[in-house]
Image (cartoon, grey):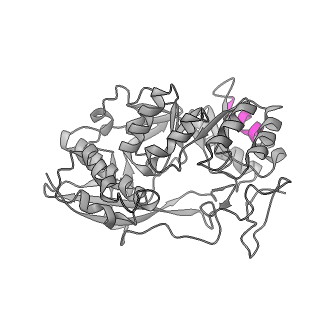
């Protein structure tokens, strides 16, 4: 079996609600989903997901190679961009290719990827995560009631603008999830919107009323000293790592004893997750994947000894994708279809040149100009021409 080419596709996921975080809100209720199909001379295709606009920089590392040598090919892709660097968009392309190669490896073995990776149990414990900062209180409760119907007893909310507002929402979601647990686990994700002093003041005020399992990305992703400082002054755990593009970027955080929950983004691939999980396990730390459409890394999460909980953001699939998994009992039940379990209906998906996600003037992927530089919590805000203030959709 040899890799012969690739196809890039783009589809949509319909959320049925606006999604976003402390940095901004998506302009509509749909988001783009990037799909990569890796072709082989055996007539079997591998499927990966995630933006892969830099694929032409790394595809030469796998073209003509046997995809079953996936970990060696992963290192070959890293070596392929040795001088120009593998961070950012290049790492996304490596991740999408890596998923597709693992998909091919498991398909060649005739088994689901979780089996290929050595997992014993197909169930992956999870937590609900609604990307919910744009929702009013009633819609927030309605959303988490749907998650509670699927057995979830833990949830992560987006916040960071107004402590009173966030506290009210956390208490409301705790009440919803209490039907599944006497002590639901609650987390808050600030998405790098604070400095370290803001983070400590904010979280300690929340902790006067509510017990947080963790605070996520309280400060900038690379700020090891900042994360360590926050961790020393709050009760909640500190979680970070979803935006780190490479195993080496975790080293300062681990050396500074700055993290309690090591996170990994799904879009960076299977091999990156497995290696990060192993390093976290060496430090006796749990690992928690931050999800992406179709939850591809769930197969790898089932196979590592220190997996804590898998972020579950959606209960439906993007258009044109059929995913062999169920969201029940507060987690993901993986199926028996060979590979990652993603079937692609290409007739219903747009064929495109490999591309990056469309950049906007504002939104959750654009950092506001005054993030981490405000003395007073903002509360609900509206967008301005400068882009320094952004729409949250939160109630007044």
Q: Would residue 260 be visible to someone looking at this image?
A: yes
Asked if 349 appears above or below 168 in the picture, the reply is below
The magenta stretch is 170-178
Q: Residue 56 placed where, x, y %? A: 31, 67
- Classify residue 373 as left or right of residue 244: right
Q: Residue 226 placed where, x, y %? A: 68, 43
Q: Of residues 365 and 196, which is closer to you in this image?
A: 196
Q: Is the magenta stretch mostly helix, strand or loop?
A: helix
Q: In which quarter of the image is residue 37?
A: bottom left
Please, which residue is most extreme toward the front here? Answer: 83
Asked if the stretch drawn in magenta spans residue 174, the answer is yes
Q: Residue 24 placed where, x, y %? A: 67, 61
Asked if 9 appears above or below 187 in the picture, the reply is below
- Classify residue 35 as left or right of residue 250: left
Q: Quadrant of the C terminus?
A: bottom right
Q: Would residue 215 be visible to someone looking at this image?
A: no
Asked if 396 appears above or below 102 in the picture, the reply is below
């Amino acid at each position: 079996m040899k890799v012969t080419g690739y196809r890039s596709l783009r589809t949509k996921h319909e959320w049925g609600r606006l999604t976003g975080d402390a940095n901004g809100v998506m302009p509509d209720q749909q988001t783009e989903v990037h799909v990569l199909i890796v072709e082989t001379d055996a007539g079997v295709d591998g499927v990966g997901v995630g933006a892969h606009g830099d694929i032409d920089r790394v595809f030469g590392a796998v073209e003509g190679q046997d995809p079953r040598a996936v970990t060696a090919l992963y290192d070959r892709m890293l070596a392929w961009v040795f001088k120009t660097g593998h961070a950012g968009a290049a790492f996304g392309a490596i991740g999408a290719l890596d998923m597709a190669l693992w998909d091919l490896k498991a398909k060649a073995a005739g088994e689901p990827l979780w089996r290929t990776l050595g997992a014993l149990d197909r169930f992956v414990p999870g937590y609900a995560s609604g990307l919910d900062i744009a929702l009013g209180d009633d819609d927030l409760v309605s959303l988490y009631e749907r998650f509670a119907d699927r057995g979830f007893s833990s949830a992560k909310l987006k916040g960071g603008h107004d402590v009173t507002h966030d506290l009210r929402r956390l208490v409301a979601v705790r009440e919803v999830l209490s039907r599944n647990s006497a002590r639901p686990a609650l987390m808050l994700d600030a998405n790098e919107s604070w400095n370290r002093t803001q983070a400590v003041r904010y979280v300690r005020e929340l902790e006067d009323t509510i017990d947080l399992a963790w605070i996520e990305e309280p400060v900038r992703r690379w700020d090891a000293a900042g994360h360590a400082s926050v961790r020393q002054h709050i009760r909640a755990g500190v979680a970070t790592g979803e935006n780190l593009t490479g195993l080496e970027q975790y080293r300062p955080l681990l050396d500074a004893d700055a993290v309690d929950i090591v996170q990994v983004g799904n879009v960076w691939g299977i091999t990156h997750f497995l290696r990060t999980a192993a390093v976290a396990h060496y430090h006796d730390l749990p690992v928690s994947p931050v999800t992406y459409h179709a939850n591809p890394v769930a197969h790898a999460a089932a196979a590592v000894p220190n997996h804590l909980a898998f972020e579950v953001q959606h209960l439906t699939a993007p258009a044109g994708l059929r995913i062999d998994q169920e969201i029940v009992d507060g987690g993901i039940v993986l199926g028996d279809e060979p590979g990652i379990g993603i079937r692609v209906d290409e007739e219903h998906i747009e064929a495109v040149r490999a591309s990056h996600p469309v950049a906007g003037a504002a939104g959750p992927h654009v950092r506001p100009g005054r993030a981490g530089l405000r003395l007073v919590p903002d509360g609900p805000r509206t967008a301005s021409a400068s882009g320094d203030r952004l729409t949250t959709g939160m109630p007044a």
